């Protein structure tokens, strides 16, 4: 399809679907597109940013295309001349947009020698470099920097690991359109029943702000100064999705922008006041290892607890519901719990399986990385640990509190011990605090000399480190390949056995410890780790690179890369598609609300539960919002993830953007996610769709998010899901 035709179609769809329906009186400016540049790998040569620098000896690099160069700088040069009228005929001649696509990892970009943008921090900035690999480089530049004759765009790029460079699309230079300059938003605090609609623009504008919800349209004439914000609060019932259409038309140019929002809505019914057991049906421990288990009961506090069938060696704290002790003899021990509070009583059951396997259900908990990145401290970990209890998450089984990278001191002590840095005054104390409350402590390291964040790894000190962690009460180790890649790169032909080697080494050190340490491999799925992770006694292994809080990332990491892996997951060893990207995340560069829409977040959680994925929360828990808690505390959704059969789902059917993922559950029923990956909502006959997907005749079907029978017909929103548990008709 030609670009012109595409533009016309986009315009027409815009006109038909949205409220920007008056004819437009401008010609959309055509952007300049660059698919190659002069390129140099290595430190920048003197004068490389000047127009008369001779780059004839540089190679021509296609854009997008990655290059190999761990920890290396590279430079790009693009000369260009503007077509006539490029600036003067534009509707907004003040601003030119440089779309430099995505760059792995960091860039500094210049137009005619003047810096126009920078993302990430590079070694020459000082400190630990920070990658910005997932940031779209859209640099808005004062158009007066453009010259009439030849212009020169220069990029200094730094790549952290292996391949780097401009990797997604070509470079585009275009005059700003209203949509580049205007921000339409629907600000929420996560309560799920109101939002603040707003519009702002980088340039002064006058126009009409229009919003529509539930068929009711309202319009306001607004006059905005540069970056001034006009807002309007709207309220709705929080229980089901509400569509909000917002648009702004600039009266001078006639240009119009619009956006559809589905503000957050909470589907999970509130928990009853009476005690309810939300916990797993099985728990694994090795003979003689300390057991720490907090009974996951929701309901009013105070609550008292009783156990029936406790094997010798275990005691239950009847006040806080923490089970501890150890069991010497291997075997299956069925235990029954009862809990009481002022509203009533509740019960639950669990089989303690003392043997060789840990993590009989996927680990649940919190990790510091997706919110704090390298900017982490004991105080921050503590505040999320505390919140795990206060917000009630621990009542749903979230129990691991995992410190990711950046806890390590700068040097080992004389006897080789790696102590924490000054941000972590007392990790052992934190461990004790967690254990007292029935929670567990996790730590991070690398088999290499350095971790990904440039901190000391365990190379050569594996036993020492495992001993130290044991002494601190560590219950979980995330072991991240990172620095070990340098060693693999030096081998003439590194193969699977070379990848296994460092993980086997740590396995031996960990399994010697008198504690049950959950062993989490993080090597991004290299050498098909799912085929050998269980052989190094790993309890989980990352199957992919890092997740981020975009739908594209959830699509790639969840919906694409987990296909065909179900057979490798099972009790004791799980595929790990990385941590949850809901709530407030930010990787240490300032917390922000996850960029996933409400429906995308429901899909994310549903898919992870279907995949029997570890449920490791990645957001700051200190101020949990109602929507995020509603996602994390649905006991029927969790029950699918924690199902004792441990059979992970795979995609069994797909058509027109609809995908069905299904898994069998221990009670003979099935769980299925009907995901709408398309960009339009889809109404379907639920039972018919399950039958079409080859799942046979359905006897009963329960909507897990809403915790009630699924309706006969259901509209799945864009990127949303209907997550059900169903029984097949016996005949
Ligand atoms: C990455 C890893 C992330 C995080 C980070 C720490 O390699 O995939 O999850 O642990 O290193 O530097």
Image (cartoon, rainbow, N blue to C red):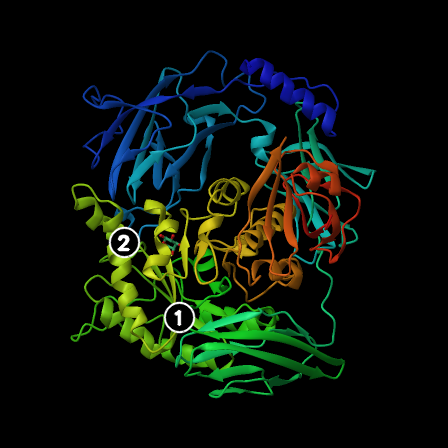
Residue positioned 57% across, 56% down in the render: 583
Which residue is at the front of the view, 154 or 457? 457
Residue positioned 33% across, 46% down in the render: 526
Tell me the quarter of the image containing the N terminus. Answer: top right
Query: Taking 225 as reference, is 420 above or below it?
Result: below
Residue 425: image quadrant is bottom left
Q: Is residue 43 visible?
A: yes
Q: Which mark is residue 356?
A: 1
Which quarter is ligand 1 in? bottom left
User: Tag 2: Cα neighbours inside 10 Å, few (<14), some, or many (≥20)?
Assistant: some
Residue holding disc 2: 500
Residue 576 left/right relative to 108: right
Q: Secondary structure at mark 1?
A: loop
Q: Seen from this angle, which residue lies furthest top?
A: 84
Q: Nearer the viewer, mark 2 or mark 1?
A: 1
Label 1 beta carbon within 8 A of ligand 1: no
Q: How many marks?
A: 2
Which residue is at the front of the view, 422 or 635? 635
Label 2 beta carbon within 8 A of ligand 1: no
Instruction: From the top left corner, tell me how far across and down residue 212 is, in percent.
Output: 78, 38
Instruction: From the top left corner, tell me how far across and down residue 653 is, in percent.
Output: 60, 37
Residue 720 left/right relative to 4: right
Q: Is residue 243 visible?
A: no
Instruction: From the top left corner, tell me how far across and down residue 254 is, in percent.
Output: 68, 23
Question: Which of the marked residues, 2 or 1, is nearer the chain's N terminus?
Answer: 1
Which residue is at the front of the view, 20 or 642? 642
Residue 337: image quadrant is bottom right
Instruction: From the top left corner, tell me how far across and down residue 728 is, in percent.
Output: 70, 50
Q: Secondary structure at mark 2?
A: helix
């Amino acid at each position: 399809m030609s670009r012109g035709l595409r533009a016309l179609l986009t315009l027409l769809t815009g006109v038909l679907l949205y409220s920007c329906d008056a004819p437009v009186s401008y010609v959309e400016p055509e952007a300049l597109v660059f698919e190659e540049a002069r390129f140099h790998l290595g430190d920048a040569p003197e004068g490389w940013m000047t127009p008369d620098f001779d780059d004839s000896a540089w190679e021509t690099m296609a854009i997008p295309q990655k290059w190999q160069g761990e920890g290396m700088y590279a430079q790009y040069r693009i000369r260009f001349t503007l077509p006539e009228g490029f600036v003067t005929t534009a509707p907004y001649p003040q601003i030119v947009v440089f779309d430099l696509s995505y760059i792995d990892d960091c860039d500094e970009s210049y137009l005619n020698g003047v810096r126009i943008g920078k993302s990430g921090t590079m070694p020459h900035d000082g400190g630990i470099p920070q990658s910005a690999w997932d940031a779209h480089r859209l640099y808005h530049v004062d158009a007066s920097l453009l010259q009439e004759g030849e212009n020169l765009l220069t990029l200094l790029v730094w790549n952290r690991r292996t391949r780097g460079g401009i990797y997604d699309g070509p470079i585009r230079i275009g005059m700003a359109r209203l949509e580049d300059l205007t921000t339409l938003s629907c600000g929420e605090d996560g309560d799920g029943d109101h939002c603040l609609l707003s519009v702002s623009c980088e340039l002064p504008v006058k126009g009409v702000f229009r919003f529509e919800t539930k068929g009711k349209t309202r319009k306001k004439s607004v006059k905005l100064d540069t970056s001034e914000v006009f807002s309007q609060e709207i309220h709705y019932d929080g229980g089901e999705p509400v569509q909000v259409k917002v648009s702004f038309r600039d009266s001078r140019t006639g240009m119009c922008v619009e956006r559809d929002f589905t503000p957050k809505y909470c589907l999970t019914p509130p928990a009853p006041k009476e005690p309810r057991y939300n916990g797993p049906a099985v728990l694994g421990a090795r003979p003689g290892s300390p057991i720490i288990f907090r009974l996951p009961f929701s309901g009013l506090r105070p609550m008292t607890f009783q156990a029936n069938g406790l094997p010798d060696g275990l005691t239950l704290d009847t006040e806080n519901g923490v089970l501890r002790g150890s069991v010497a003899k291997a075997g299956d021990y069925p235990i029954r719990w009862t809990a009481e509070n002022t509203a009533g009583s509740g019960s639950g059951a669990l089989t303690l399986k003392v043997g060789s396997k840990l993590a009989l259900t996927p680990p649940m908990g919190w990790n510091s990385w997706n919110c704090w990145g390298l900017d982490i401290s004991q105080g921050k970990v503590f505040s999320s640990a505390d919140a795990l209890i206060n917000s009630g998450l621990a009542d749903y089984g979230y129990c691991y509190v995992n410190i990711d990278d950046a806890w390590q001191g700068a040097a080992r002590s004389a006897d080789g011990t790696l102590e924490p840095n000054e941000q972590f005054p007392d990790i052992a104390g934190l461990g004790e605090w967690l254990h007292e409350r029935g929670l567990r402590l996790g730590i991070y390291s690398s088999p290499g000399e350095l971790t990904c964040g440039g901190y000391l790894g365990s190379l050569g000190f594996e036993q020492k480190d495992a001993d130290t962690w044991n002494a601190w009460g560590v219950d979980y180790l995330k072991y991240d390949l990172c620095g070990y890649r340098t060693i693999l790169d030096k081998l003439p032909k590194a193969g699977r056995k070379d990848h296994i080697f460092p993980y086997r080494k740590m396995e031996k050190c960990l399994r010697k410890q008198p504690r049950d340490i959950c062993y989490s491999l993080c090597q991004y799925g290299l050498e098909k780790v799912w085929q050998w992770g269980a052989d190094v006694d790993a309890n989980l292994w990352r199957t992919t690179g890092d997740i981020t809080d975009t739908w594209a990332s959830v699509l790639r990491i969840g919906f694409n890369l987990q296909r065909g892996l179900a057979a490798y997951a099972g009790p004791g060893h799980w595929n790990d598609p990385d941590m949850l990207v809901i709530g407030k995340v930010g990787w240490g560069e300032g917390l922000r609300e996850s960029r996933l829409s409400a429906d995308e977040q429901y899909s994310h959680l549903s898919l992870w539960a279907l995949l029997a994925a570890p449920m490791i929360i990645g957001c700051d828990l200190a101020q949990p919002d109602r929507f995020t808690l509603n996602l994390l505390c649905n006991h029927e959704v969790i029950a699918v993830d924690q199902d004792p059969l441990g059979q992970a789902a795979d995609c069994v059917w797909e058509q027109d953007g609809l995908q069905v993922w299904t898994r069998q559950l221990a009670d003979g029923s099935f769980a299925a996610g009907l995901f709408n990956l398309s960009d339009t909502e889809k109404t379907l006959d639920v039972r018919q769709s399950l039958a079409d997907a080859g799942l046979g005749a359905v006897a009963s079907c329960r909507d897990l998010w809403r915790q009630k029978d699924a309706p006969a017909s259901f509209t799945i929103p864009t990127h949303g899901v209907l997550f059900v548990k169903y029984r097949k008709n016996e005949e």
